[in-house]
Amino acid sequence: MKSLMHTQGSTTASDVYKATLTSHVGIFQSPPRIVPIEVSYSEQQQAQLAYFLRLLKQANQENRWIMFIGQDALLDKRLLINAGIDINKVLLLKNMKKQSKHLLMVKALEMGNCSAVIVSGEIETFNTPLITMAAEQSKTLAFVLNQNVKAQLTFH
């Protein structure tokens, strides 16, 4: 899985999920070089969303939080419940002081009390050495939802 992370400009949720299946270890047992994982999907293309939810379900099994940074990153509560995610272990960090999402993600990763941290934005903004190092040290998954595509998704 490590070579997969190094060869691509960004890593997708399906890349990470498929790599955990082929390596026969959990996402936290043999930590890869964790970079922000890109989750881009639309109403027509929901495969990445399905892989993302599977990874969140695995992360939810740890005794740590799943943190969404900003209301724009938060997924529908019913969608999380239907995916088998315990919403009692989900946090929403509201950016009341309008701080940089990048900085908030770094801080959330460095704290080490989350198994996954999710933010909405462009992958290039979050694909930095600071985020990579913080995610590696805390063994936390860092996800970036593509906000341009996410806005087109409707929940029924």
Image (cartoon, grey):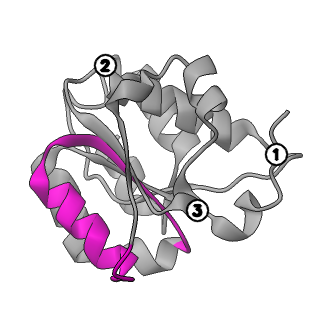
Range drawn in magenta: 96-122
Q: Which mark is residue 61?
A: 2
Ranked by sequence position, the earlier of labels 3 and 1 is 1
Of tags 2 and 1, which is closer to the observer? 2
How far apart, in angstroms, are the residues tagged by discs 2 and 1? 27 Å
Can you give x and y, in whole percent of width and height, for residue 143 in the image?
Answer: 44, 54
Q: Secondary structure at mark 3?
A: helix
State the residue at coordinates (59%, 33%): 77
Residue 101 falls in image quadrant: bottom left
Side (left or right) of 114 relative to 40 = left
Can you give x and y, in whole percent of width and height, for residue 57 in the image?
Answer: 45, 24
- Three-letter amino acid code of the residue under disc 3: Asp
How far apart, in angstroms, are the residues tagged by discs 3 and 1? 19 Å
Would you call the spot at circle 1 few (<14 residues within 10 Å), some (14-19), or many (20 or more)? Answer: few
Can you give x and y, in whole percent of width and height, for residue 9 in the image?
Answer: 48, 69
Q: Nearer the viewer, residue 20 or 44?
A: 44
Quarter of the figure that contains the N terminus: top left
- The residue wearing badge 3 is 72
Can you say whether 46 is above or below 20 in the image?
below
Ranked by sequence position, the earlier of labels 2 and 1 is 1
- The residue wearing badge 1 is 45
Would you call the spot at circle 3 few (<14 residues within 10 Å), some (14-19), or many (20 or more)? Answer: some
Q: Secondary structure at mark 1?
A: loop
- Three-letter amino acid code of the residue under disc 1: Gln
- Three-letter amino acid code of the residue under disc 2: Gln
State the residue at coordinates (25%, 52%): 33
- Farthest residue, direction front: 96
Answer whether labels 3 and 2 touch (C-beta < 8 Å).
no
State the residue at coordinates (11%, 54%): 111
How far apart, in angstroms, are the residues tagged by discs 3 and 2? 24 Å
Of tags 3 and 2, which is closer to the observer? 3
